[in-house]
Image (cartoon, helix red, strand yellow):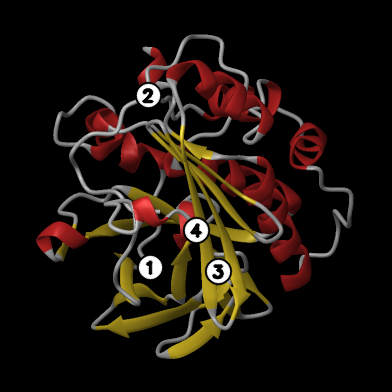
Amino acid sequence: MDIEEYFERIGYKNSRNKLDLETLTDILQHQIRAVPFENLNIHCGESMELDLETVFDQVVRRKRGGWCLQVNHLLYWALTTMGFQTTMLGGYVYITQVNKYSNGMIHLLLQVTISGKNYIVDSAYGFSYQMWQPLELISGKDQPQIPCIFRLTEEKGTWYLDQIRREQHIANQEFLNSDLLEKNKYQKIYSFTLEPRTIEDFESMNAYLQTSPASVFTSTSLCSLQTLEGVHCLVGLTLTYRRFNYKDNTDLVEFKTLNEEEVEEVLKTIFNISLEGKVVPKHGDQSFTI
């Protein structure tokens, strides 16, 4: 694995030597705009592997994306290789339908320490929940970013990541009541502790998430990619584009329903993905919002 290959993949041409917040932010933003959050392997009859060499080949050489256990694993390798003090952490995702956090540790995120300050870095939550800048690990402070306002709070050693969302204007009136739309202005995202993790801690959950009928990832094909102004999302056959803060503290959301023949072309032109196998788009009945 070559760090220069990684930089080329994400289009990063700036400093390799400055281990500061500006460089960290730059790396994060390049990755989220080049590497999609996606689970398409599952829906092409392939597996989602955690082995770093395999992830590097998939994301860097074959120009694919992946889910958090893969993409944040790659980011961990890149930041560590550069010299950043980086720690893997494990998260518990908030499930709106049951009003609680997941029982299992299903999300991988990173903590990066710079000049004695700790930051949370996550390149793979995707959709409109994706941070665009590292979040300072400080409790109760609103941290405004282009996608939304993020807030970290700490209670008895457990940290919680929430967001305060804007109003949303739906361009297509027939989608006003779509189950893909997040209805809450205040949204819980995930919880985590600062206990260091290794990739091995996620192996059993990685297997579960891509095989269990109870997993949203087996019932729904997902792909999202951040842009300079918003985010493209593909859920099953539904393509959306959210433009953040297009006017008056409001996001613009545009919907388009594809047919199966259009999916491959959309993946190429919008998400820069060329699949080796044929994807079978799915949008199951488990709730998932963009």
Q: CA distance from mark 1 to mark 2?
A: 37 Å
- Mark 2: which amino acid? Pro
Is residue 129 found left or right of 147 in the rendered image? left
Labels 4 and 2 touching (C-beta < 8 A): no
Residue at x-position 53% and y-position 69% = 251
Q: Which residue bears the numbered disc 1?
A: 194
Select label 4 or label 2 by which is in front: 4
Residue 237 position within the rendered picture, expressed as x and y whole percent measured from the top left: 40, 31
Q: Eyeballing the image, is 288 above or below 185?
A: above
Residue linked to disc 4: 171
Q: Amino acid at mark 3?
A: Pro
* Residue 182 drawn at (x, y percent): 33, 63
Residue nearest the observer in this picture, 272 or 208: 272
Q: Nearer the viewer, mark 3 or mark 4?
A: 4
Q: Earlier in the sequence, mark 1 or mark 3?
A: 3
Distance between mark 2 and mark 3 Cα atoms: 27 Å
Q: Which residue is mark 2?
A: 281
Mark 1 vs mark 3: give the one in front: 3
Tag 4 or tag 3, which sits nearer the N-term? Answer: 3
Q: To which residue does mark 3 refer?
A: 147
Mark 2 crowd level (few <14, some 14–19, many ≥20, 10 Å Cα): many
The residue type indicated by label 1 comes to Leu
